[in-house]
């Protein structure tokens, strides 16, 4: 059974300004640099076209830093490939993401929505974690979502800081 979570990053900037940040390679480089404080991260590809924004990132977590329960499943460093897509800018801009681990026993995916609020804008991410392992699957799903919430919070803070300095 999959577990779900929603997270909202709220900004005092307009949707247009937030989308412009999401369209900026410098912004994504700033995100990756901040996340390097926690684990090795790389921006593998970044592309802005008429169909939107596409990003591929690698998050590398040494096996020794994984919780014991995850170490029973992962026999080497965890390399997470995250694919992010945002549709072209509109008043409400939709997007999606997925994250995969080679030979990983589950999936992580979600949708995003950037929309205006009275005080600026919100980027809402709805995520679903599913682990296909009996007995430990639910614990790993919960662990994934807790860590994902921390990731979204950190990335939201980077975006807010970047907007404050660049708009």
Image (cartoon, rainbow, N blue to C red):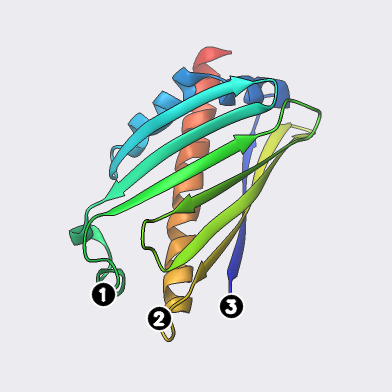
Horizontal relation, residue 28 to residue 91: left or right: left
Distance, label 3 to label 2, CA atoms, is: 12 Å
**Real-space Cα distance between discs 1 and 2?**
10 Å
State the mark number for residue 136: 2
Q: Which residue is mark 3?
A: 1
Q: Residue furthest left?
A: 64
Rendered image quadrant of residue 140: bottom left
Residue 42 in the image: state x and y as whole percent: 34, 34
Relative to 46, does residue 62 appear above or below in the rendering?
below
Residue depicted at x 27% and y 66%: 74
Identity of the residue drawn at 54% across and 23% down: 47
Q: Quadrant of the N terminus?
A: bottom right
Mark 1 crowd level (few <14, some 14–19, many ≥20, 10 Å Cα): few
Mark 1: secondary structure? loop
Q: Residues within 10 Å of mark 2 (few under 14, many from 20)?
A: few
Q: Is residue 27 above or below residue 146?
A: above
List the residue tagged with mark 1: 72
Kindly give the residue lying farthest to the top in the view shown: 167
Q: CA distance from mark 1 to mark 3?
A: 20 Å
Q: In the rendering, at what x and y percent does residue 58 appear? A: 37, 41
Mark 3 or 2 closer to N-term?
3
- Of residues 152 and 165, the one nearer the viewer is 152
Taking the image as drawn, is residue 147 in sight?
yes
Q: Are marks 1 and 2 in contact (CB under 8 Å)?
A: yes
Would residue 125 be seen by someone viewing this image from the given angle?
no
């Amino acid at each position: 059974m999959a577990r779900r979570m929603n997270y909202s990053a709220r900004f005092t900037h307009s949707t247009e300004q937030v989308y412009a940040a999401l369209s900026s390679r410098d912004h994504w480089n700033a995100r990756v640099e901040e996340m390097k404080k926690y684990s090795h991260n790389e921006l593998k590809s970044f592309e802005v076209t008429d169909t939107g924004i596409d990003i591929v990132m690698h998050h590398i977590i040494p096996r020794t830093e994984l919780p014991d329960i995850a170490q029973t499943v992962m026999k080497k460093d965890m390399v997470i490939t995250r694919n992010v897509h945002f549709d072209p800018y509109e008043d409400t801009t939709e997007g999606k993401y997925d994250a995969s681990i080679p030979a990983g026993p589950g999936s992580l995916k979600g949708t995003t929505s950037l929309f205006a609020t009275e005080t600026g804008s919100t980027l809402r991410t709805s995520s679903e974690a599913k682990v296909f392992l009996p007995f430990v699957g639910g614990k790993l799903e919960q662990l994934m979502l807790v860590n994902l919430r921390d990731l979204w919070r950190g990335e939201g803070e980077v975006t807010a800081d970047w907007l404050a300095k660049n708009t």
